[in-house]
Image (spheres, helix red, strand yellow):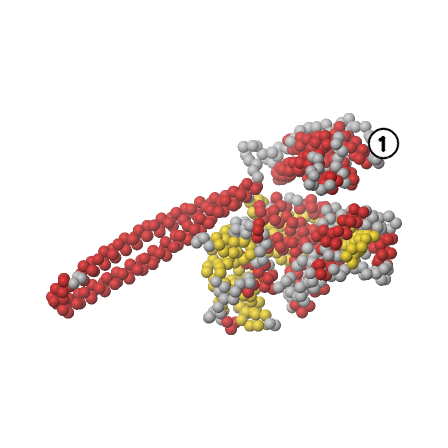
Amino acid sequence: MATDDERFLQRLLATFRLEADEHLGAMSALVLELERPNAPNEPNEPARAAGLVETLFREVHSLKGAARAVNLADIEAVCQALESVLALLKRAQCAPPAPMFELLYRTIDVLRGLLDGGEYELGGLLHALMAAQYGLAAPAGAAPAPLPPPPAASAKAPGAAAPPMPTPAAMPGAAPEPEQTVRISTAKLTALLLQAEELLAFKFSAEHMAADLRALHGELEGWRKRWSRTVGEARAIGRAGERRHGAGVAGATRKGPPLERLLEAVERDALLAKSISERFVQIERSAWQERRALAGMVDNLLEDMKRTLMLPFSTLLEMAPRLVRDLARDSGKEVELRIDGAAIEIDRRILEQMRDPLVHLLRNAIDHGIETPAERRQAGKPERARLAIEVLPRDGDKVELLVSDDGRGIDPLQVRERAVRDGLLAPEAGAALSTAQMLALVFESGVSTSAMLTDLSGRGLGLAIVREKTEKLGGSVAAEAAPGGGTRFRIVLPATLATFRGLLVTTAGRQFVLPSRNVERVARVLPESVQSVEGHPTVLLEGEVLALVQLWRVLGLAAPSAPSGYLTLALLTSGSRRMACLVDAVLGEQEVLVKGLGPQLRRVPNIAGATVLGAGQVVPILHVADLLKSALGAGVGGAPLPAPAAQAARQQLLVVEDSITSRALLKNMLEVGGYRVTVAVDGVDALGVLRGGGYDLVVSDVEMPRMDGFDLTASIRADRRLAGLPVVLVTSLASREHRERGVDVGASAYIAKQGLEQNNLLATVRRLLR
């Protein structure tokens, strides 16, 4: 019987096969594109080739990392050699020479063969890749350096010290038998699920029609009973007339419209009404039986389809150990990761959206929460920090994800101070915040307590992304102090995205759906319960004073007529935020199917989607988190920040870079943000420019002639007039030692050139210029 480790390895190898197949397909397409001649309407050949080589380099690098994770040394060795060749092409910003394409195709074929379990003598291939590397590295016109002789035996990954593992083909049970599984695109499964979800509309419609039949039958039965009473009263009146007037009346009635014949006709109609009522009972009973059968089939089909797209959290968490190890190593820290509840399943679509938030939480814990071994020793803690990921099922078809560490924790007062200093929170509003509300500020964009900005953290964006993506999925996130010290982030997610319970409400004559998970309760209060506190309406509910908003006002609708009598309130919650919302009426709670608004309406404020009611009416679903933000104003209160372009127009930046290409790139990035930019070619040139005055921030490379970026930063800090000037170091030196040196010399931010993005650079600059 396979052990847990063997089963885990089998899953990991199966996952690697899928990932490697995608990488190899992309690599083949990129080499073909590189070999294709440039079309007349395309960018110039060097720029196009440089972009393709960069993308190819990333694909090879990703495949190499994945192969190392499963200890496939042969694939890793080939990728390493190929990556070295591509690195030289990338540096030269050119396409491979024509003779090299055959070598590239051969390398991809060998990698695919290794992936399929084939055995290859790799010495010749690795020697050919090394020869290509030597040829690219030699100066133009110079003879290449002598190449070592090719090895006689098959080469393995250089320096591979891990114990050997069986090749994928030899791994028992690693590849499932064809009759056991069928590989199918997840896109097709998703499309099938969406079609199955469409059947819910027919289920709701059948339920609506059955309810209408029941209501119609009730009205018919009420009319029949009233008609029977009327017939009885008419007969009584007729008998009373005969007794009062005797035969004369009886004779008269024979000459005129006979009352008896009229009553007989009425009785026949009453019997017909009774027969119709009985048929209604049969139709209603059949309708409800068919509705129940249809509902059962639809629910079972949808549940089975959901299960095909339900994945265990382990598919998301398998990357966590390697990520934590790498982050801890890069930051010089020791971290022990514990994962619990990884077998709990959740909708695949939710897992896909939660990958980035989880990475941000882990990076936040290691970068900001966990101390260095020296700091932990000084604080009396074990040098090895503890980081835990827990997945817990919760009532109501929800799942809870906890990420906690035993680090220094979050100082709520420091968070509040930073939010006030950055203009995200008014001082008087900050003074009234509770500890939970102060901790909630860490999810606001721009709030960060990190003293040093890097390309990975410190800009105050990571946790804002966590909340944004979590709330978009209908979940919530909160930060709290972990038991025994440290920080714990609590994320609550729905287990599936298809349907949920919703509260149907009306305001200004229109219907909307509020997700039931965001409605704590519904209350009816007298108008006298509404009071104004500091100019804002509030309501007292069970001894608690809550802010009150009018739904029609937040949505920008026309004002409805003034309510008479009681007011209807829905108490809305999202994370730690709570607010009472005034609506015209609550029509009831029902299951709703979420429908997207389409690509034309990707982002509509306060609206999460739409649903179709049983009667065919399309009703918007409200996004409660957005609703609370709209009601509370921009951010968490306080005056809105000035627009970046208007703010940047008054600010002058200096870019220091010895490379013409990199200098032009950085200058263009910053000018797009609205800044005025001057350039310098090295540190000596930059100091001369800065001493002329008028600069608000410096963006500098590190490796430069005459004076590098480290020495330039130290010189700026040593100059009394320039000491307060923010300095952003943008460099290819991304190791921990270089980052620490940047901190030592006084850099305000340290960003690696690898994967440099304009948005990140501009966000860092804006943060430092506040």
Quick one: quadrant of the C terminus? Answer: bottom right
Q: Is residue 141 visible?
A: yes
Which of the 4 quarters of the picture holds residue 223? bottom left
Q: Where's residue 451, x and y in %?
A: 75, 58
Q: Where's residue 300, x and y in %?
A: 47, 45
**Residue furthest to the top:** 152
Q: Residue at x 78, y 38 (%)?
A: 88
Q: Please say if 544 is above or below 706.
A: below
Q: Please say if 423 is above or below 33.
A: below
> Observer-nearest residue: 8 or 149?
149
> Observer-nearest residue: 527 or 417?
527
> Observer-nearest residue: 244 or 13?
244
Element on which disc 1 rests: loop
Q: Is residue 62 visible?
A: no
Which of the 4 quarters of the picture holds residue 648? bottom right
Instruction: State left or right for residue 434 relative to residue 675.
Output: left
Q: Where's residue 28, x and y in %?
A: 67, 35
Q: Residue at x 60, y 72 (%)?
A: 535
Residue position marked by numbered label 1 in the rendering? 143
Q: Residues within 10 Å of mark 1 (few under 14, many from 20)?
A: few
Q: Residue at x 61, y 72 (%)?
A: 534
Quick one: quadrant of the N terminus? Answer: top right
Amino acid at dot 1: Ala
Q: Residue at x 53, y 43 (%)?
A: 191
Q: Please say if 339 is above or below 430.
A: above
> Observer-nearest residue: 490 or 182?
182
